[in-house]
């Protein structure tokens, strides 16, 4: 807890949109934070000069034994990437709640942190709470030791920053896939034998800087990394082919000079050919440019973001990216689901399919931490965009015959591509879709005209129900929050033959309530997918 000796500046105002609202269409906060506990309040507290370390600003060496003593809410330390932080003053500011953060108290929480939100810059967020470095010492082995009896042996840090004793072998796991290359007069082709039958071309991202080529292939829970300084130059007009029968990936790259024979592919860089857990990978960002901005609603914008020349990044269905920026000396990042430019097939952008641009639908909160900056951007402005991130499995969608979509506010964004995939791409599909869309007012409903058009064209397969929490007197549709009464109207009768998929996205309390209600109605875990930001 913040503690009686900390003075927290009050920002934003109590009635600000950044505060939790009882409406299910409020901002995507994870829990209801107390007044004065917003992210901007935390930034202001960090700049106030108050001691947040709890040790008078000294930099200590902390043993695991000492760290373990600080595991209570009134006295909480955590180790992240070899550094120890006093999280006691931050507990009430944590968007995920005190209980969630306390899971890592008194221990090395690096792995837990990476599993939940690796993309967050904890070092920047907790900079003013730094206690010191984590020091772990193990007794030297009696046999095979080059050190004298009674001496100690220091540890190293694993790639994710957690402690890894020198005398422990790395755990066994999946091996990197085999790769090869060949050429003809016009192009060079890299072949990777993934053997993953669910492999798709959007799980391949490519970055070219001069002749330095980086390829990331996302394989379930791991990422295969290729990093090569090419022998000669190529044209960044890539053609990625995936063989569905065996998971083989072919990356075809045109030569800058045709009929020029390459002796080798190039020089392998230090991280070339590595297979790492995706959750432990360092998040990388690209400097991108805003190509266009459209107003979707009074407070929501659709941004077309152009990726750097040399980059190919097609975002898989249900995945998102992170945008980061430095606000008041603190690096902040937020996740946004990638959408299409429209639900209309005639308004699609071929550059999306080519992996050259992506579209983001972002609600601008006047008193938010990051979105006021995003709202002030214009065409030509730059912003940093991360690699793809997510865990939605398209096989869930492919197997379903009944698709229930529950969205609140900008929780609509993951539903955009699910709707398009089912009703436009798979026009002959027999899958039936029901969307229940929660908002405050009618003007807040995103792309209502397009949704109504989609219903008119697919009235036998699609139904959309709009629910408003603050309707005007003319509104005749459902009102209020998500509740059992409303969900029962959308849920099909559950039996062994029901191939059902329920997807939910919105403020976390909304999403969790949807999941809870769905389970009470007989849904199994494999029939549910919650998009949590």
Image: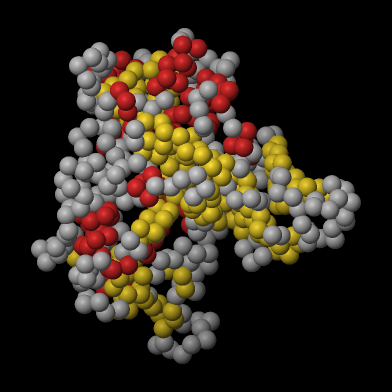
State the scheme by which the image is colored. Answer: secondary structure
Q: What residue appears at the point 49 percent right and 74 percent down from the top-left corner?
A: 167
Q: What residue appears at the point 19 percent right and 65 percent down from the top-left corner?
A: 75
Query: How far across and down, in percent of the image, does residue 382 sit?
Result: 50, 52
Residue 344 seen in the figure: yes
Residue 215 seen in the figure: no
Query: How far across and down, in percent of the image, does residue 385 sit?
Result: 50, 50
Taking depth in this image into account, of 90 and 512 the one nearest to the observer is: 90
Furthest residue toward top: 460
Query: How far across and down, in percent of the image, does residue 30 sit?
Result: 28, 44
33 sits left or right of 388 in the view: left
Furthest residue toward left: 4
Taking depth in this image into account, of 108 and 122 the one nearest to the observer is: 122
Looking at the figure, which quarter contains the N terminus? bottom left
Total of numbered circles in the picture? 0
Furthest residue toward bottom: 148
Q: Is residue 79 above or below residue 223?
A: below
Image quadrant assignment for residue 275 = bottom right
495 sits left or right of 199 in the view: left
Q: What residue appears at the point 63 percent right and 33 percent down from the top-left corner?
A: 350
Q: Is residue 510 above or below residue 367?
A: above
Image quadrant assignment for residue 474 = top left
Looking at the figure, which quarter contains the C terminus? top left
Query: How far across and down, in percent of the image, does residue 24 sit?
Result: 26, 32
Q: What residue appears at the point 25 percent right and 44 percent down from the top-left corner?
A: 18
């Amino acid at each position: 807890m913040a503690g009686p000796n900390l003075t927290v500046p009050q920002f934003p105002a109590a009635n600000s949109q950044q505060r939790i609202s009882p409406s299910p269409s409020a901002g995507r906060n994870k829990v209801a934070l107390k007044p004065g506990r917003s992210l901007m309040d935390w930034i202001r507290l960090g700049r106030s000069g108050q001691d947040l370390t709890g040790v008078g600003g000294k930099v200590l060496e902390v043993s695991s034994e000492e760290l373990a003593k600080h595991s209570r809410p009134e006295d909480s330390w955590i180790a992240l990437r070899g550094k120890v932080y006093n999280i006691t003053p931050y507990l009430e500011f944590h968007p995920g709640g005190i209980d969630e953060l306390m899971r890592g108290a008194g221990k090395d929480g690096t792995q837990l942190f990476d599993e939940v939100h690796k993309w967050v810059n904890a070092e920047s967020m907790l900079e003013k709470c730094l206690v010191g470095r984590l020091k772990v010492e193990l007794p030297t082995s009696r046999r095979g030791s080059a050190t004298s009896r009674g001496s100690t042996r220091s540890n190293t840090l694993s790639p994710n920053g957690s402690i890894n004793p020198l005398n422990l072998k790395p755990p066994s796991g999946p091996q990197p896939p085999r790769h090869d290359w060949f050429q003809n007069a016009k192009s060079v082709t890299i072949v990777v034998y993934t053997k993953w039958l669910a492999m798709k071309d959007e799980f391949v991202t490519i970055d070219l800087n001069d002749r330095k080529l980086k390829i990331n292939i996302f394989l379930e829970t791991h990422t295969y990394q290729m990093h090569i300084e090419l022998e000669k130059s190529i044209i960044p007009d890539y053609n990625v082919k995936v063989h569905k029968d065996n998971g083989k990936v072919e990356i075809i790259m045109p030569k800058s000079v045709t009929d020029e024979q390459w002796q080798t592919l190039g020089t392998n860089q230090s991280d070339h050919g590595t297979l790492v857990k995706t959750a432990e990978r360092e998040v990388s960002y690209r400097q991108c440019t805003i190509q266009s901005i459209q107003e979707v609603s009074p407070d929501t914008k659709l941004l077309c973001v152009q990726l750097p020349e040399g980059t190919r990044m097609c975002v898989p269905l249900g995945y998102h990216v992170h945008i980061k920026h430095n606000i008041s000396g603190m690096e902040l990042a937020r996740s946004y689901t990638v959408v299409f430019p429209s639900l209309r097939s005639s308004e699609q952008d071929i550059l999306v399919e080519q992996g050259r641009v992506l579209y983001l639908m972002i609600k601008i909160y006047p008193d938010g931490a990051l979105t006021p900056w995003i709202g002030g951007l214009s065409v030509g402005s730059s912003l940093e965009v991360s690699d793809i991130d997510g865990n939605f499995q398209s096989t869930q969608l492919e197997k379903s015959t009944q698709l229930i979509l529950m969205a609140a506010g900008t929780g609509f964004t993951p539903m955009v591509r699910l709707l398009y995939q089912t009703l436009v791409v798979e026009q002959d599909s027999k899958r039936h879709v029901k969307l229940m869309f929660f908002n405050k007012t009618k003007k807040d409903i995103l792309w209502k005209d397009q949704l109504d058009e989609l219903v008119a064209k697919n009235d036998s397969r699609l139904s959309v129900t709009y629910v408003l929490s603050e309707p005007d007197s003319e509104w005749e549709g459902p009102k209020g929050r998500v509740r059992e009464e409303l969900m029962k109207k959308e849920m099909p009768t559950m039996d062994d033959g029901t191939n059902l998929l329920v997807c939910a996205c919105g403020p976390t309390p909304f999403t969790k309530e949807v999941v809870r209600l769905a389970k009470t109605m007989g849904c199994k875990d494999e029939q549910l997918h919650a998009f949590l930001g």
